[in-house]
Amino acid sequence: MEIETLNTDNLIAGDFPIVPGDGTILTGQTLVRGTVVAKDSGNANKLIPVQSDHGTASVHDPYGVLAEDVDATGGDVVTTVYQAGEFNEDSLVFGGTDTADTHRDALRDLSIFLKKPVSA
């Protein structure tokens, strides 16, 4: 008998409705669930990690949160992106030196709300 193990990552952090959408991850990247992504206008609006100090202005603005790990090293990959919901800010991944505080207001404008984890 084989028993599956459930691994939780605590990405989802509340009852606000999760709104999934989709997006295309730009080739050449391996990204993890919880990465906050932006549309890169210089690459046909394909998704890369949001990064405020990136040379391309369009990737300064968050688009959503990756719902799953993505390996796009062999080519572009269409994947699920959360476009609204409540998320544990400690489980999010950002590009460059960005943090949850860097994008908190812009994410709130997208109905993506960040929560700090609470210890029991």
Image (tube, rainbow, N blue to C red):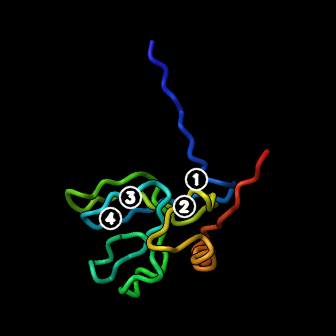
Q: Which residue is mark 3?
A: 31
In front of the other: 54 or 20: 54
Q: Secondary structure at mark 2?
A: loop
Q: Are marks 4 and 3 in contact (CB under 8 Å)?
A: yes
Q: Are marks 2 and 3 in contact (CB under 8 Å)?
A: no
Q: Quadrant of the N terminus?
A: top left
Q: Which residue is mark 4?
A: 25
Q: Residue at x 57, y 56 (%)?
A: 91
Left or right of residue 78: residue 83? right
As shown in the figure, which amino acid type bears the numbered disc 3? Leu
Left or right of residue 96: residue 74? left
As drawn, the label of residue 11 is 1
Q: Are marks 4 and 1 in contact (CB under 8 Å)?
A: no
Residue 51 on image: x %, y %? 45, 77
Q: Nearer the viewer, mark 2 or mark 1?
A: 2
Label 3 Cα neighbours within 10 Å, binned few <14 / some 14-19 / many ≥20: many
Q: CA distance from mark 4 to mark 3?
A: 9 Å
Q: Are marks 2 and 1 in contact (CB under 8 Å)?
A: yes
Q: Earlier in the sequence, mark 4 or mark 2?
A: 4
Left or right of residue 57: residue 114? right
* Residue at the right extreme, as displayed: 120
Q: Earlier in the sequence, mark 2 or mark 3?
A: 3
Indicate whether 15 appears above or below 23: above
